[in-house]
Amino acid sequence: MIYKTFNKIYDTDIGYSFFKSKIAVISSTILFIILLCSVFAGVVSPYNPFDPATVSLMDAFTPPSWSEGGSSSFILGTDQQGRDMFSTIIYGSRISLIVGFASILFAMVLGVFLGVTAGYIGGKYEIVVMRVTDVQLTIPSILMALLVNGIAKSFISQSMHNDMAIYVLIFAIGISEWPQFARVSRASTLVEKNKEYVSASRIIGLSNILIMFKHILPNILRPLLVIATIGLALAIITESTLSFLGVGVPPTTPSLGTLIRFGNSFLFSGEWWITFFPAIFLIILALSINLLGDWMRDALNPKLKIR
Amino acid sequence: MSFLEVKNLNISYPTRKETIVASKDVEFTLERGEILGIVGESGSGKSTIANAIINLIDPPGEITSGSIKMDNNELRDNEELIQKIRGKKIGFVFQDPQTSLNPLFRIKDQLIETIQTHLNLNYQDALKKSIQLLEEVGIDNAEKRIEDYPHQFSGGMRQRVVIALAISCEPDLIIADEPTTALDVSIQHQILELLKDLTKKRNLGVIIITHDMGVIAETTDRVIVMRHGLIVEQGDTKELLTNPKSNEARSLVISVPPTNKKIDRFRLISPDGKEITADSKNLTKKIIKTWGVREKNENKKILQLTAVTKIFDDKSLVSNFSFGSKAESTNKVEKAVDNVSFELFEGETLGLVGESGSGKSTIAKIITGLVGPSNGEIFYNDISLYNSKRKYQIDKSRGQIQMIFQDPYSSLNPRFKVRDIISEPIKLFQKNINKNELTQNMYDLIDIVGMTRQSLDRYPHEFSGGQRQRISIARALATRPRLLICDEPTSALDVSIQAQVLNLLKDIQDELHLTMLFISHDLPVIRQMCNRIVVLKNGSVCETKETEELFNNPAHPYTKELIRLMPKIESII
């Protein structure tokens, strides 16, 4: 059964190109493992770093297990509060991935909606939407995110802020990523709307909403999927940067960026592992997403089709 | 010894799943001063052979065996020799003059570059020669025009420049791959005359690749008929066209619409050589039952256009939804449609004929509401289709006007199954249809267009062009239309497939009493399909007449010209 499904996937052009590409296979395997780990963080990680009962300050600054003074119960060592690094990384990656996926989803929904409607409707509406997009593109995404964060802080009370931080972050990253989606989906819509199947739908009398989102949207998904994948890596990095700067998720539920920030202050006093392992993990995560995106861009491009 | 000798040529394209044989044991010869035609349906390997001669086969394709000899020199796998010969001894004319010239170089630069690469001439001599060449291919004011860029020339002029390029280094052989397919009738005629002329004057060998039997009949001395990479028949053009022996050649010849008479139906030949006589008459019975019997009232005006004008540049009048307006506004003609009036009576087929840019497609778009008119009125069943604000009233026609498009590859949504493509309009117009009725409706439609019911669960890309056009017809019929607009429905199809689709359209019309507006640039097809014809030129009507009257007694000089110039397969018989 599994063998049969595998053969079926292998038989398609995309499947074939995937299994032919070592980079695609390796990066997606790594990504898959990371995803599994972060979904089942409670099962995979030896400790729950957010449960104060399991954390003991006595264990603080334990180096990795293979170095001098290391303990076999903390493979990658512990941080300044005595939390197991391995567990915090897994829990931290969970936060990073949630923020990454959610903000890309938000950016995609917003950008694709505006892009498709702008491309299809045209006229003044298109001009307004696309100029807003242009303006948005001139603001660096970190700056945008900082701005949103700053505004949010002044509106939300301190006690609420920790709970709201993650949503603010998703909104902040999403709002700085949507112009990409808007541009690509508008351009693709302009191509699709001149095809005869769209004319046929209009002559039949289908509503514009149906034509845009039932007929055109499925036909422009390929390029969107590619920029979504590459955008995901970017979103995760942006999240880490914001957290590193201290405007991201609160320290009580650290993400990868927060972990790197904590570790950074101990880097020169010899406790290198606190910042090193989260950083390496972040690099591997972002790199495998990007490599997968690169492969996807080539494989989904009909011009570069592998025979 | 012949001038060009191709022997035992085998070309294959290995792909992941199978090896496609594009040419199998192909053998032919060509003498100087002779025009050889290669004809066949799409995918029969015509272009592959031409590319093989100049060693320009796209990877992964490769010549697996055989030999190509020109003046007794082996060309196959001899890249060094080929590079010297390509452009010098062999000139190539491509199909699309829009893309075969580099848009960033002046005509002068392109010609001189080619000449200086192959001939030992200095710049001044090369320039002089280029001007001579342009004059030879019939470009007026060549000295001045040589300074222009390709976009400043029209399609026909550009093809002349391409021919000038091809003959610039005094080649012995010209290969023309569909040289006139992208051109209008009158320009096609000029280009073919030019090629014939050059062949005689310069004693060239010419290979013309085409799918148009009219072109074959009017220009070639000998012809090769190909199918699936095999030569199925070759011989003297006259002999082959009057007395084709193989089934493939017979099928090709028989399905060409005759230009000199109107026939009731096209005759079709199946691959085993038998004539196909079946039609879809009994299949329409079920549809008639669900549609209700329609009375045909031949005196009833179903559609009327009065003084319709369309100006694309006028921004204030173009609605925000005007599709394709950007592409068409680049036309030199300011008025895409200029004061056009005609009417359509119930049950008849009206032909709209004209060259590219004559506004025929724009008229179709105006009637279906894809583009708003700048001026004028359109009445369907005495109801105006546009309100006072020039907004299309699609509710007024309720799906009774439907359209069949030119390009079967873009007219079906690639992400929809055939089932969804056909059921969508049915569901739209019959809101509370139950599942059984819906399935029955779909079966009726898919039966009537001659497709199997299994095709409902497949995607458009799994079908050939002709089959897609049938699906397109089924979709158009799904809303139970009374007026069917066919915009060049067969111009992208092979001639035998064209015959099948035209037969189908005729049957459907007869049975369902449909009214048709048939748009085409192809006069023979128009003659077979239409009762009356409107001739358009540059957006305005030249004349409107009964079909036979128009062909036998054209009044307008433009109509006369069109009829005189259309390639006629009968010219040789």
Image: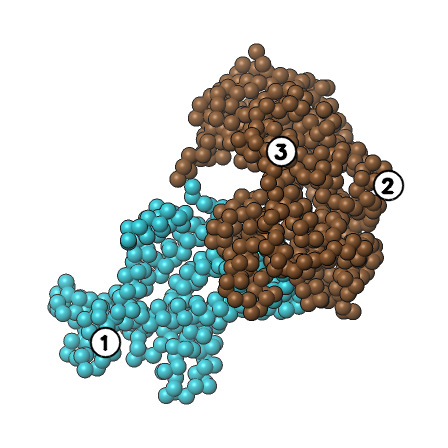
Chain colours: A cyan, B brown
Q: Give the chain letter at badge 3.
A: B
Q: Which residue is mark 3?
A: B211
Q: Judge by depth and name the residue closer to the eye, B555 or A238.
A: B555
Give the residue displayed 57% in from the left and 28% down from the top: B247
Q: Which residue is mark 2?
A: B556
Q: Is residue B176 left or right of residue B565?
A: left
Position of residue B565 measured from the top left corner of the image (x, y, whole percent): 77, 33
Q: Are marks 1 and 3 in contact (CB under 8 Å)?
A: no
At label 1, which amino acid type do we have?
Pro
Disc 1/disc 3 C-alpha distance (Å): 74 Å
User: Would you place residue A140 above or below residue B215 in this image?
Assistant: below
Is residue B55 at all visible to an observer of this figure? Answer: no
Residue farthest toward the top in the current orientation of the protein: B1
User: Would you place residue B213 above or below residue B35 in this image?
Assistant: below
Q: Give the chain letter at badge 1.
A: A
Position of residue A61 measured from the top left corner of the image (x, y, whole percent): 19, 73
Q: Nearer the viewer, mark 2 or mark 1?
A: 2
Query: Which disc, if any, is residue A300?
Result: none
Is residue A124 at all visible to an observer of this figure? Answer: yes
> Mark 3 or mark 2, which is nearer the start of the sequence?
3
Q: Is residue B147 left or right of residue A188?
A: right
Position of residue B285 measured from the top left corner of the image (x, y, whole percent): 61, 53
Q: Judge by depth and name the residue closer to the eye, B76 or B569.
A: B569
Position of residue A171 measured from the top left corner of the image (x, y, whole percent): 45, 75
Looking at the rendered structure, the secondary structure element under dot 3 is loop
Give the residue displayed 50% in from the left and 62% down from the top: B436
Q: Judge by depth and name the residue closer to the eye, A166 or A218.
A: A218
Q: Which residue is mark 1?
A: A49
At label 3, which amino acid type do we have?
His
Question: Residue A39 is drawn in which quadrant?
Answer: bottom left
